[in-house]
Amino acid sequence: MNPLPPLARTRTKVAALSARTPLRIKLIAAMLALVAIALAGIGAGSVSVLRGYLLDRVDQQLATFAQDVARRLQRGSGLGPGSGLGPGLGSRVPPDGLIQVRDRDGALLVTLAGLEAEHRPGPVLPDLSGAPWRPQTVPAASGGGEWRLRAVSIPDVGSFVIAIDLSSVSQITTRLAVTELLGGGAVMIILAVLGVVIVRRSLRPLVEMEHAAAAIAAGDLGRRVPDRDPRTEVGSLAVSLNGMLAQIESAFRAREISEAAARTSEQRMRRFVADASHELRTPLTSIRGFAEFYRQNPAGDPARLMRRVEDAATRMGVLVEDLLLLARLDQQRPLAMTSVDLLALAADAVQEARILAAGRAIALEVSGDVAPIVSGDEVRLRQIIGNLVSNALVHTPAGTPITVRAGAAGTTAFLEVADKGPGLAPDQAERVFERFYRADPARSRAPALPPSAASDGQAGESGVPSDPSPGQEGVGDGEPGPPRSDPPRTEAPRTAPLRTGSLGAEASRAAASGGSGLGLAIVAGLVAAHGGTVTLETAPGAGATFRVDLPLSPDVLGPATAG
């Protein structure tokens, strides 16, 4: 492998050094370098301008002196020793000046120097054959001094050279250069301090962003960068970064919620499957027990045994249908939405309840001036009311009054089923809408309905019967045991359900089985599917009131209110 050339290696080293150098050091170094270059340029320029100005003054002095000497030589009596030229010019030579006069042959006639110049090395004379009257700067014969001189030739007389020592000019320019150097150094130090402060303050938002990023990486997703003026680069970056962090937090929160929901759903499904298996085991055990009993006692009453087997199979079928309904609700399948009058459904439920429980006081109350018409699935809404009313019929003592209320308040239609039973404890009321939940069996409030109530039908208009919830006030738990000696009963034909048959079916199944714990869970699921809420107000000894709130139909509210 060929080594890199020296220039390439140098560039690589510089790039590596620049890559690992902090930004604040780069900024301060760049600022100081630019200021140093600027100060150096200004200093060199000012020294050059001052030197040029001083040399111009020296040249003017040389020109004036040269004109005076030329006039004296032109009107003098020659250049000989007795001409008196030396004493006359000596008084006019500057203190740092010098004059040499030569004849036409170039022989030196006289040299005159000022008081300061006579103790200094003289200039090195250049070739004087060039054009006259042009000032030149020449070095001193010894040492490091300089002279500014001018040579003048006078036709038929001779020539002379006048020079002025530039020591004063050098001193002035040197003093200026030193002053500028010291001043520039002070300026560089001050700028370095100010640069450190300014750069540190300017980069503080980046440090805060770094800390925020570290906190977010550690798990603090709610951490944000402090807001800055969005008109600045750092402020604009902070706004963009906070927006990105908000989206990241939302995504993580959504994922956490989704994972929590998945875990909850999995736990609920496991519990649901376990409870369903337990509930299905009971009627299956009954069927097997009756079959074994018949096999061991073939001379018994086969009609009574078959009826008990059919009862167990019916309970198992009802449970399966309830489970399927809850599964459909979990899948959020669309409902057959139409305009439904809750008051009409409540009236049907009250009429049927009065038939089923002739000895009870069952009242219907209407509230509000607006018809409680909602957008919903009529079959499912009937199932909601049927479950609530049958729940009150089965799980309250005989003769307990029941009140059904329907009406509208604001933009909401409501339906209430209230009883004067013993009520529920707070811990029971909290779980009343859970699937397969049953309250304490010791609080069961009603005996089984008479066979006449059970014979009113097995299925409602929907064709999908459901158990009333065992969660309401003291629902019992358990399934019928082996063959019992109750009298035979008749059942309504399953192929021709009456309009009010669903309530009878619900009450019959609840009375026969003690409830599967799905009735009120189905109510809660159906109400939620209609965009409503169901609540329970109860206390021990104060009865129970189930209230269903549903949005009024837009046809009732009108376009303005509905919008």
Image (cartoon, rainbow, N blue to C red):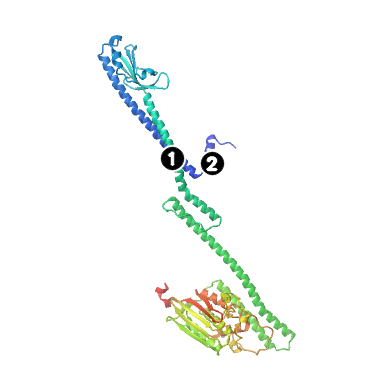
The percent coordinates of residue 484 (x first, y second) are 68, 87
Mark closer to the chain start, 1 or 2: 2
> From this viewpoint, which residue is outermost toward the left?
75
Tell me which residue sits at (46%, 78%) in the image.
413
Nearer the observer, disc 1 or disc 2?
Answer: 1
Quadrant (top left, top right, bottom left, bottom right) of the C terminus: bottom left
Viewer-closest of 255 and 336:
255
Is 118 left or right of 420, judged from the image as shown? left
Question: Dot 1: what SS?
Answer: helix
Question: Three-letter amino acid code at disc 2?
Answer: Ala
> From this viewpoint, which residue is outermost toward the right?
296
The percent coordinates of residue 160 (x first, y second) are 32, 16
Query: Circle 2 sits on which residue?
Result: 16
Tell me which residue sits at (56%, 55%) in the image.
218
Viewer-closest of 433 and 202:
202
Quadrant (top left, top right, bottom left, bottom right) of the N terminus: top right
Label 2 crowding class (10 Å Cα cut-off): few <14, some 14-19, many 20+?
Answer: few
Viewer-closest of 560 and 203:
203
Question: In the picture shown, does residue 270 fall above or below 463?
Answer: above
Question: In the picture shown, does residue 346 fall above or below 171?
Answer: below
Residue 190's label in the rendered image is: 1
The percent coordinates of residue 434 (x first, y second) are 58, 74
Q: Is residue 157 visible?
A: no
The percent coordinates of residue 343 (x first, y second) are 47, 83
Label 1 crowding class (10 Å Cα cut-off): few <14, some 14-19, many 20+?
Answer: few
Question: Dot 2: what SS?
Answer: helix
- State how far apart marks 1 and 2 are (Cα): 30 Å
Q: Is residue 546 visible?
A: yes
Residue 61 sits in quarter: top left
Question: Three-letter amino acid code at disc 1?
Answer: Ile
